[in-house]
Amino acid sequence: MPEKSQKTRFGMIKERHGKTFENALKQGKMDEQMIGLCSFAAGTKGFYTSSCCSGRIILLEKNGEAKNKNAFHRKWHRTVSARELIEGVEENKGGVLWLKLDPFILHIGCKNIRGANSILEAMKKAGVKRGGIMVAQKDKFLIELQGTETMALPIKENGKQLAEKAFIEKLLEKANPLLEKNYARLRALENEFRKTLK
Amino acid sequence: MPEKSQKTRFGMIKERHGKTFENALKQGKMDEQMIGLCSFAAGTKGFYTSSCCSGRIILLEKNGEAKNKNAFHRKWHRTVSARELIEGVEENKGGVLWLKLDPFILHIGCKNIRGANSILEAMKKAGVKRGGIMVAQKDKFLIELQGTETMALPIKENGKQLAEKAFIEKLLEKANPLLEKNYARLRALENEFRKTLK
């Protein structure tokens, strides 16, 4: 009996996350580059994904210390043109505007430490450097994996541009290839998962 | 007998890391803000620290893709004056020079999953968002914890300054308080460790 109820607990968590993923997919809310990996996980017996982001270039408006006062002024899960970025910067009116390149972040769940270790092994093989088991409870193991390509700086404050247009364009010339590199790493991770997770 | 040899394996790892820490301390190689936490861990029965950094402002010279071609042009484990930073930027001659604020990173080891979970709990209580168990083997659990305050951008390329001096100074005005915030978080983490780890 205990064995059965244990299975049921993990099964319920997996099922719930599976439905959330299906709904996000139907509603077009999934990042394009994350769909393959999440679909694969949903189809396995022992794994599921919860929140994730494929990596992005954003303009983040910070209005004070608290994170809940941050607003996404622009968000792209793909490489960006100079025109798009400059337009985004010009249309911001207040707060401190940060230009950021965020790497992928992925939460993947499994039933036990054996499953968690197979994820950590796949992570290493794919050359992903950041990651670890964040929750280690009976029937509920949750692993966070993250890319390492980043850029982050304030470029505008209270409507006043701090960085010049030419410099922002130069930053974008560096940010776009880093984002591509991030997506390539994410694909490598998906490939390792497909080889080893069941 | 098996129980005894298990104890010995963990004990040996802890002892080795304890010696490395003691030597780093004697040679003045420890980051000032990390000494309290590492000393405390060394004095516990069940925990040790391995590599760690308290958080820093750096000028990193990148010479191509490979990480081993990166060189620390400047490195400060404290807040920095505009004069120091500008001087550092001006003295760089080649590669792509990145200005970075890196948050603290800490590796802490323990014997089993119970110990690992007590670290994850302390982490949450201290408001540290990034962290997880990176190695989960018999008698060898390793947890990585990291702060979230970051800044990262290229400011010079092949000896040519991309960002203007006034803008670099403006960035530093943002970076210094973020570094202080990072150190405050690290102190909160040390306090939680002192309350709960034995």
Image: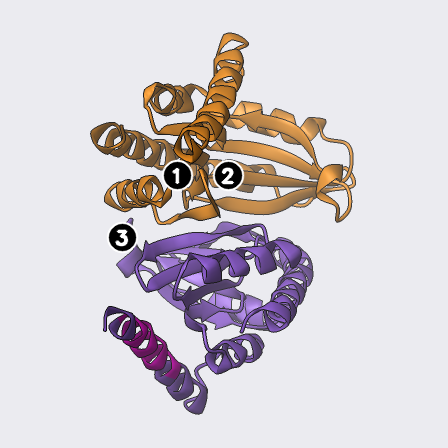
Chain colours: A purple, B orange
Quick one: B189 or B79, which is closer to the camera?
B189
- How far is mark 2 from mark 1, CA to CA? 8 Å
Judge from the rendering whether residue A16 lies leftward or rightward of residue B64; answer left or right: left
Quick one: A112 or A96, which is closer to the camera?
A112
Expressed as whole percent of the image width and height from the top left, the position of residue A190 reads 60, 70
Quick one: B119 or B8, which is closer to the camera?
B8
Q: Which residue is mark 3?
A: A66
Going 48% across and 68% down the picture, which residue do you hit? A53
Give the residue furthest to the front. Answer: B1
Q: Residues within 10 Å of mark 2 (few under 14, many from 20)?
A: many
Going 39% across and 33% down the picture, which residue do you hit? B3
Q: Which residue is mark 1?
A: B178
The chief SS type of the magenta part is helix
Going 56% across and 66% down the picture, which residue do you hit? A86
Q: Report in which chain the residue with disc 3 lies.
A: A
Q: Is residue A9 visible?
A: yes
Q: Which residue is mark 2?
A: B101
Disc number at residue B16? Answer: none
Expressed as whole percent of the image width and height from the top left, the position of residue B12 reads 49, 24
Q: How many marks?
A: 3
Give the SS element for disc 2: strand
Residues tagged 2 and 1 counted as in contact (Cβ below 8 A):
yes
Q: In the rendered structure, which amino acid carries the disc numbered 1?
A: Leu
Give the SS element for disc 1: helix
Same chain assignment for discs 2 and 3: no
Give the residue furthest to the bottom. Answer: A26
Please identify the quadrant where the N terminus of chain B is shown: top left
Q: Residues within 10 Å of mark 1 (few under 14, many from 20)?
A: many
Instruction: Answer with the quarter of the image where residue B156 lies.
Output: top right
Q: Is residue A162 visible?
A: no
Instruction: Answer with the quarter of the image where residue A91 lies.
Output: bottom left
Same chain assignment for discs 2 and 1: yes
